[in-house]
Amino acid sequence: MKEKVKKAIIPAAGLGTRFLPATKALAKEMLPIVDTPTIQYIIQEAVDSGIEEILIITNSNKHAMENHFDRSYELEARLSESGKMEQVKMIQDIADMANIYYIRQKEPKGLGHAVLCAKSFIGDEPFAVLLGDDVVVNNDAKPALKQLIDAYVYKEASVVGVQTVEHGEIDKYGIVSPSNSYQRECGGRLVKLNDMVEKPNVDEAPSDMAVLGRYVLTPKIFELLENQEDGAGVEIQLTDAIKRLMDIQAVYAYDFEGIRYDVGDKFGFIKATIDFALNRDDLKDEVQKYIESIVKGGK
């Protein structure tokens, strides 16, 4: 019987220095896209993909995140007294989204180390990793993580989420190297890997498929992370462990469908905010008019 992917890890221990001064006292994952914290979109994707339990890797400055996904009885009572029952239901639904747990990454030792912190939580099961800097929208279609989970179930092997990026942007990403001997499947979206290269020179890149913040991994990765030597930045890199995993087990890339926003980048965050606002019935007309006025005014 094929194992179901029921657990997910969201590494969220970074300091968010690119968004200072906002992140001096507020976790970057709590920065709102319109009126919803970024991490809530990530958790919703996980839940919509069938994930039942989520472990968020945090640090000592992330209390607001834990409070957001907890019950707030005083706020609920105040809203109820004011007759704002729709808002009461909204904040109760946030607390009931999933079984969410937290553990601290006590040292800033990289993404691989953050994943390793979840070893006892995951046990001997396949699991998902969702990075909080990548918000993926796939309206009325299968969530990005669900696409990877389906590929995992099909192949019973680790799957890395990728998308094709502009050739001139290749040196900003980890790039996968597809196996030349493997026939692509799932409409050309699924391919077996033989290597991954971190931020290669544009002219030396093995492909234009970039790793973009979604993984489904077998528990074998923990054994490799435990003895993984420090990589770039004197940190334990998940990419390095996945490359070693390829020597032991098959690893695939899945070119997932959906619009991906890099909300760890200021411009990417602004793009997400504008697009999400334009997709809301209560905001789109005003936002559209404002954008048109800017264009006409030549600002």
Image (tube, rainbow, N blue to C red):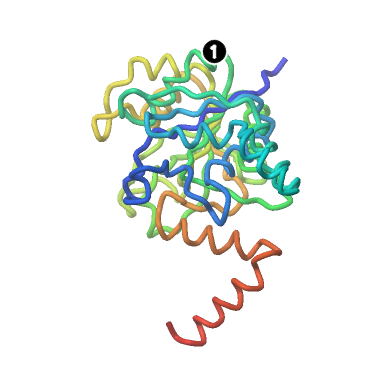
The answer to whether 34 appears left or right of 3 in the picture is left
Percent across and percent down for residue 252 are 54, 33
Q: Residue at x 56, y 29 (%)?
A: 128
Quadrant of res 225? top left
The image quarter in which residue 149 lies = top right
| Residue 127 vertical placement versus 146 (above, below) | above
Q: Position of residue 284 (x, y in %)?
A: 65, 68
> Disc 1 marks which residue?
123
In the displayed structure, would residue 224 be above or below residue 271? above
* Residue reaching furthest to the front: 81
Q: What amino acid does circle 1 point to? A: Gly
- In which quadrant is the C terminus drawn? bottom left
Nearer the observer, 73 or 37: 73
299, 261: nearer the viewer: 299
Q: Is residue 191 above or below residue 249?
A: below
User: Which quadrant is home to the N terminus?
Assistant: top right
